[in-house]
Image (cartoon, rainbow, N blue to C red):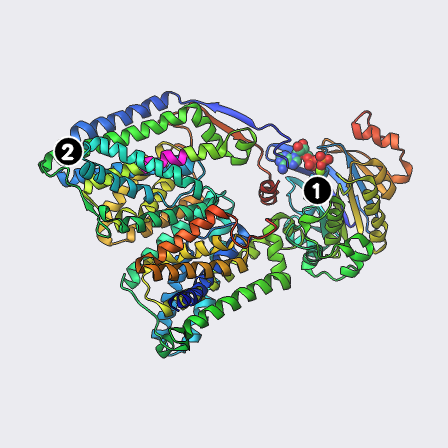
Amino acid sequence: MPLLELDGVDAAYGELRALWGLDLRVEEGETLAVVGANGAGKSTLLKTIAGVMHPTAGRVRFDGRDVADVADHRRVALGISLVPEGRRIFRSLTVQENLQVGAYSRRPGPWDLAAVFDAFPLLADRRNRIGAHLSGGEQQATAIGRALMANPRLLLLDEVSLGLAPVVVGDIYRALPTIAAKGTTVLVVEQDLGQALSVADRLQCLLEGRTVLEAPAVELTREQVAAAYFGLEEAP
Amino acid sequence: MSAAKEAPHAVVRRGGRSSVAGAAVMVAAVVVLAVWVPYNVSLGGLTQLVGLFSLIILATTWNLLAGYGGLVSIGQQAFIGAGGYGVIYLADAVGLPLVIALLLAAVVAGLLAFVTSFLVFRLVGGYFAIGTWVLAEGFKLLTTQVDALGGGSGLSLQAFSGTDRVTRIATVYWLGLALAVIVVVATYVLMRSPVGLGLTAIRDDVKAASSLGVHVRRWQRFVYVAASAGAGLAGALIAVNALRVSPDSIYSVNYSAFMIFIVVIGGLGTIEGPIIGAVVFFVLQQQLSSYGTWYLVALGALAVVVVLFAPTGVWGLLTRGRLEMFPLGHRVEVDRPAAAGGGRAGRRSATRA
Amino acid sequence: MTWVNAVVQGLLLGGQYALLACGLSLVFGVMRIVNLAHGALAVTAAYLTLWLSQRTSLPLVVCLVASVLVFAGVGYLLQRGLLNRALRGGELAPLLVTFGLAVIVVNLLQEIATANSRSISIGGLATSSTRIVDGLSIGVFSLLTLVVAVALIGLIQLFLSRTAVGRAMRATSDDPGAARLMGIDDRHMYGLATAIAVGSVAAAGAFLGMSTQFTPGYGDLVLIFAFEAVIIGGLGSLWGTLLGGLVLGVAQTVGAQVEPAYGILFGHVVFLAVLALKPSGLMPRTVTA
Ligand SMILES: Nc1ncnc2c1ncn2[C@@H]1O[C@H](COP(=O)(O)OP(=O)(O)OP(=O)(O)O)[C@@H](O)[C@H]1O
Ligand SMILES: [Mg+2]
């Protein structure tokens, strides 16, 4: 049984449809990368999984259970944590407090303050600095750490590389294998194909709210993904 | 975040045939009030109707402030008081003709609003609201300290002392009616002018308006001054109608309660709403006057219910937006897709961007 | 010595203002709501405490605690029932709703309890004072009020900075959407914040009723003084609110020392001066969330 399973999910902002009958599954322990151009519906997909948005049709099943009637703030307790687009750090809270708030749901598991500071050493020195005074990379690390503090079974990452210098992106992506090694299933959304291919076991490409390509990462070439990404040709 | 991605879809609407009919009804009502009512209603009734006219002026100008300018003031009684004291002082101590004194009192109120706006405009939202109230309390305390204004007991109007009661009441009645009509029509004209476009943009979305280059602060100050001059005018009318002013009653925060309830119940951000609301309020006040202050409890409850469940007010419910007696030529309606589900998060994050 | 006395009495009076203001400050800090019914609630609590102490044989402290608890519950329900909904209606809605509530409450009190002024009797405590030097003595009850104000603000501050729920409340204030992603129910947090605020204003109202005569309309002044304390101190900072309360109290007593009728007016003048010269208040919060 897959950990996460989407069946024919439609999602919309008022009149504007953003997802069209989307199917997706993630096995426990695997890392799935979802890629796509601007406006492809990647963030909408993650928001629908996290319960911030509600699908207008279709099913979202987590661990075999239909989660339609589980509100967003209750999904954390089930083990779904979203690192949202734009990081959304609590600006008046210190790094450490941000992390502590992440543990609000008190799910047991391997992640605690020490483990997060281990995975993101740059945060350890900044633990008493408030969110508003952090650099983009520090904010992103805090956002990921904050989500990990809930000990999620499924971690949803929305464009963690956005707006960060390449070396910082490298630092952050280096932490992903550690996360996966602790048993956390990861779904990353990326525009950066290189990063996506480097960390993912499997890759799914969206175009205008539909899946155009889905395959194990090792079987894919950059060119194939790029073609699907820009909608140049139909995927196999 | 997403607001910049999609261009807002704008619709420009104008009034149609129904608004001509609506305008005809309004004109007819004014004619009846002007030529029939004075000869068929008791003097006491006329005095009460002047109260209705001042409520219409107050509500119309408060609506200008909150409904179009996005500024909630609970301190307009500062200017009601300034107008009330102003008209009596100007008519009696300075000796100006009553009509001139009345208009000048409104100008004085507007000037005071302009000067004090530099203080209260340092506050926003709810704190602006209480700040205006503190200002009104300050005005009241200062007034009681000035001997020329009668200290704590107030002033009586002498200008009418040679006039018989019927002439006096009729004069005040017609004056009040004329002023109410002028204020409503002036507000309407203002809203149809280019100024109105800026104001409507502010009402619809302050942040979008400022990003589109509307000088939000400048317009808001203008609206504040205009609305306060209107409050001054109403205050002058109230004083002339009652023949006296006293600090405790003319600076009473109850006026703010009246204005707010009238506008909210009638329909915030429409020209018609305050008029309808004033009539509803007036009737309720007359009907329930024997039950002490229960009418205020009832009105307060009604206002809360309207804000929460029918924010367009009575006028909005009646017309469902189809009918406008006062078609506003530049009514621009911006509709953008509602952020389904994500709305809660979207609202706050948008204000933070 | 009369001036020293005026300042000392002002500081003691300021304790009462700070106590009245901290709930207003908290609700604004967490939700950006300015609760215009704040003063009306304080006075209602004074009536409830008075009623309990007259109808039951319970000690006054118990009556006070009981009304604080009742009001905390009322605050929670008020937030969940009305204000959370109002928050969704834009910036004006919470203001209009709380203003409507204030008018309703004041007029209900007027009908039920009449406009006669009342006070809560505290026996000998009302007049007992300790003489420091000639011409300077400190009322025991006003000192108690000041101590309670400082303690309450300290406790709320500790709660916000040291407990998981307090941190969650601050996080919600920063970004309710992100807080939900952490498993925090923002509506519940808002309910708790208002419960604390209304509970604290109930305590403040009871203390007010023990130190002075009150009428249903007294809430107007309470709201204005609380507001002035918040603005003088600086938005979003509870210690600032304490400082603002003290400054306001001193301004009023020193003003009254100059000329008895000037007390409140002096308070307004100091408030307006702070607004003109340092609009962010004396102790502004450094990070505006
Ligand atoms: N809050 C919103 N309101 C209305 N429409 C929205 C909103 N958010 C996204 N959309 C629209 O929904 C579609 C999908 O957007 P989504 O944010 O899911 O794309 P994305 O793949 O995450 O893009 P990006 O790479 O730019 O983050 C787009 O057409 C976008 O314009
Ligand atoms: Mg996105």
- Badge 1 crowding class, 10 Å Cα cut-off, few under 14, some 14 to 19, many 20 or more, is some
Q: Residue visible at 51% across and 67% down?
A: C150
In the visual, does B308 lie left or right of B248? right
Q: Which residue is mark 2?
A: B170
Instruction: Return the chain for callout 1.
Output: A
Residue B25 higher or lower than B143, as above or below: above
In the visual, does A104 lie left or right of A109? left
Q: Viewer-proximal residue, B255 or A25? A: B255
Q: CA distance from mark 2 to mark 1?
A: 68 Å
Residue A232 higher or lower than B274, as above or below: above
In the visual, does B162 lie left or right of A16? left
Establish whether ligand 2 lies closer than 8 Å to the Cβ of label 1.
Answer: yes
The residue type indicated by label 2 comes to Ala
Magenta residues, start to end: B223-231
Q: Position of residue A98 (x, y in %)?
A: 69, 55
Q: Which residue is mark 1?
A: A85
